[in-house]
Image (cartoon, helix red, strand yellow):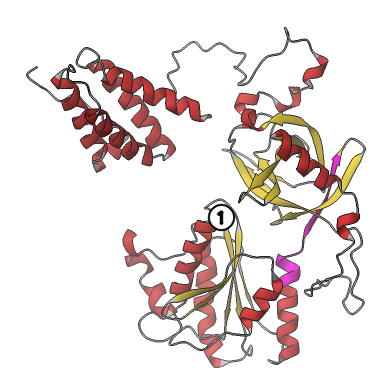
Amino acid sequence: MQIVFSSLYEEKCPFTRDYNLIKSELQNLGDYDKTCIETAFHGVNNIVLTEWGSNIACDVILVTDGCTGIGPGSLKESLSTVSQRTSSNAFPLPFTFPAKLHIVCIAAPNDPTLLKSRPLYQELVDISGYEGSILLPENLLNETSVNNLFQKLAEDMYTSFKAILKCGNLESKVILSPAPVPYTKITDFDYQTYNISDVIDVCGFISVADVGSPMAISRHLILPASSNMKENPLLKTTEIDLTTDDDTADEGRIPSFCVLLHGALKVENMAALVTISENWFGFIYSWADSKKKSNLMLTILMPGSDSVPWLGDLNYLHCSDNFSNEVLSSFPVRPAEKRSYSQNSVVWIRQAGLQSDIQKILRHARKLPEKTQQFYKELNRLRKAAIQLGFLDLLSGLASIFEHECTQLPGTAHPDCAIQLTHAADVLRKTQTRDIKHIITPLPTNY
């Protein structure tokens, strides 16, 4: 993705793998009215959240001439007012998604303007909260030093993560994009860092419906690695070739296990359980961003064999063909220990669970006023679960359902039914209802 900015920002090029498009847009850049770096960061937040959400890590590269602007909108003024901002005018850093900020200054290292700007740039990197950097050309400012600067940036940030995808005797070289990073698990008294292996081994296959939506650390595209990549003799062994190789006509004729797996998972609506390190698992599945194009994706789970509670211990999963139907159990797996307390938790792993809870409330609503206590008990239970999960849209949606139910009540319905439904809809839309300790009570009536 490519953004230009001044007092406003403009998206010149969306997220794409078309390098020629990116190069052509770089050649068409123009001059604008002023330098306002804060505006650019607001644009980055908006575009990345729309495209990828708040969980996918991205690298943000700010290319500048070393100037931070003057007057209103300058970087110095923006940083001086960070602590005075309100929620409606918050500073865009740290980003609303995991991101490393790299600032590339195309200016001579001894430039007086750059010397004044560098502390401000360092403050931006510190506020971003991750291991960012400030990059400068070495020695003199010329074409060679700038080329070396971006070559070093590409080597540090965009080196592909190459791995081998294996399933029994079948294997295929693949590339994960974006490259996965080590994961550090922090507990009360200890921390442990996990590194992903370069061998992704398929353990077995499971229905996508049984997998559900488990908590994930990151998600990555799985791309087949070219088996006959040509080396550029003009580059050193540690350098990255930024040019494109158009001689890929024969790639489609070479059998690829990666392509075979993608097609099988897509047709069968299955997911492949894989190991990415010792006692660390993930799922490979086919994901479609449109009706015509689908991609092979890897979801990396939390380290450990109990990262998906409703599947049980992942180390104990076996092929169902080895057991009789009488022995087989279905998902979700119930815990072996019997709890000694009443568990009244809400679980919405599947869509049917949420629909069932809403329908239960509506059944009580149609039997008001006899079921008034049960109606408000289930309503408060669902409202509390929605707030805990951050599913606040459910509250306004439930209010709309109640209003619709009022219009569908038969003529024989009790008057208190419409009154209580209208009362519940009004309360669900109030801001104090977002407090998890708040309890919705029945509206006193004379009926």
Q: Quadrant of residue 270?
A: top right
Count up the numbered dots. Answer: 1
Residue 157 in magenta? yes
Q: Secondary structure at mark 1?
A: loop
The residue closer to the viewer here, 175 or 408, is 408
Residue at 45% across, 17% down? 343
The kind of residue tagged 1 is Trp
Residue toward you, 249 or 345: 249
Q: Residues within 10 Å of mark 1 (few under 14, many from 20)?
A: few
Q: Residue, x 75% and y 34% (percent of image)?
A: 279
Residue 300 in magenta? no
Answer left or right for 36 relative to 52.
left
Between 324 and 127, which is closer to the camera in this rendering? 324
* 121 in relation to 83, above or below: below
The stretch in magenta equals: 154-166
Which residue appears at 48% of the width and 57% of the height? 96
Q: In the image shown, does 405 or 329 lie closer to the viewer?
A: 405
Question: 46 above or below 274?
Answer: below
The N terminus - image quarter: bottom right
| Image location (x, y in percent) of residue 239 | 83, 72
Residue 396 picture location, percent across and down: 31, 39
| Residue 333 in sight | yes
Q: For this view, does 161 lie left or right of residue 29?
A: right
- Residue 17: image location, x then y, percent: 69, 65
Q: Quadrant of residue 250?
A: bottom right
Residue occupied by mark 1: 52
Residue at 73%, 71% in the rendered image: 154
Q: Is residue 169 above or below residue 88?
A: above
